[in-house]
Amino acid sequence: MAVKIRLKRLGKIRSPHYRIVVMDSRTKRDGRAIEEIGLYHPKNDPSVIKVNSERAQYWLGVGAQPTEAVVAILKRTGDWQKFSGDTSPSGVDPQPEPVDKVARFNAALAEVADEPSTSAISKSKKAKKDEPKAEPEAAEAAAEPEAAPEADAAPEADAAAEPEAKSEES
């Protein structure tokens, strides 16, 4: 049985994702693999290349034949140089750290409002539970100013009612 190390295509029509697999040379491109030893996502910038180096070295040592595309990937990771003794340079561009969108939003909100940074959106339920506790205090403060205008309005209503009563008497 001839064993090959090749790419297995996954993903949508214009967004391919590949797995680096070890399989029999007679199986279909996307058929059943003996073992998956890596990932390759060419559409990301920079491309994602992850190879289990130990398993790649094992299969190369046993006699599995890599395709041209897999040889190019293994050269980028440095696994081909280990196997063949080649001295050409290797290197994979590191992936940037994922951005915390909530933290960016809160920072932008704080800059615009010129207020201390508070979490407008929180991922935890605990922060949401703390918010209602602050609202009753605000409701009490809002209720007190409303009571004062009612007291001021009552004498005005009495004064308005007195002229009407005088006109009825006359």
Image: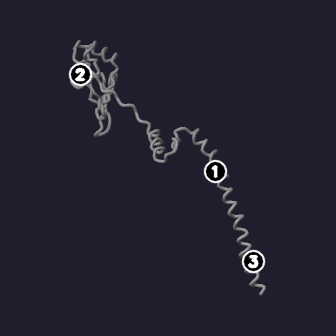
Q: Residue furthest right?
A: 169
- Amino acid at pointer 3: Glu
**Of the image marks 1 and 2, the number of the one nearer the N terminus:** 2
Q: Is residue 37 above or below residue 159?
A: above
Which residue is disc 1 drawn over? Answer: 138
SS for dot 2: helix
- Amino acid at pointer 1: Ala
**Mark 3 or mark 2: which is in front?**
3
Q: Is residue 153 above or below residue 132?
A: below
Quarter of the image holding residue 168? bottom right
Q: Residue at x 35, y 29 (%)?
A: 95
Label annotation for residue 34: none
Quarter of the image holding residue 151? bottom right
Mark 2 Cα within 10 Å, few/some/many (few <14, many 20+)? some
How far apart are labels 3 and 2 at the CA level? Answer: 101 Å
Q: Is residue 43 left or right of residue 145?
A: left
Mark 1 Cα within 10 Å, few/some/many (few <14, many 20+)? few
Label annotation for residue 71: 2
Q: Residue at x 68, y 63 (%)?
A: 149
Residue 111 placed where, x, y %?
Answer: 46, 44
Which residue is disc 3 drawn over? Answer: 162
**Mark 1 or mark 2: which is in front?**
1
Q: Residue at x 26, y 13 (%)?
A: 83
Residue 46 placed where, x, y %?
Answer: 30, 31
Quarter of the image holding residue 126? top right
SS for dot 3: helix
How far apart are labels 1 and 2 at the CA level? Answer: 66 Å
How far apart are labels 1 and 3 at the CA level? Answer: 38 Å
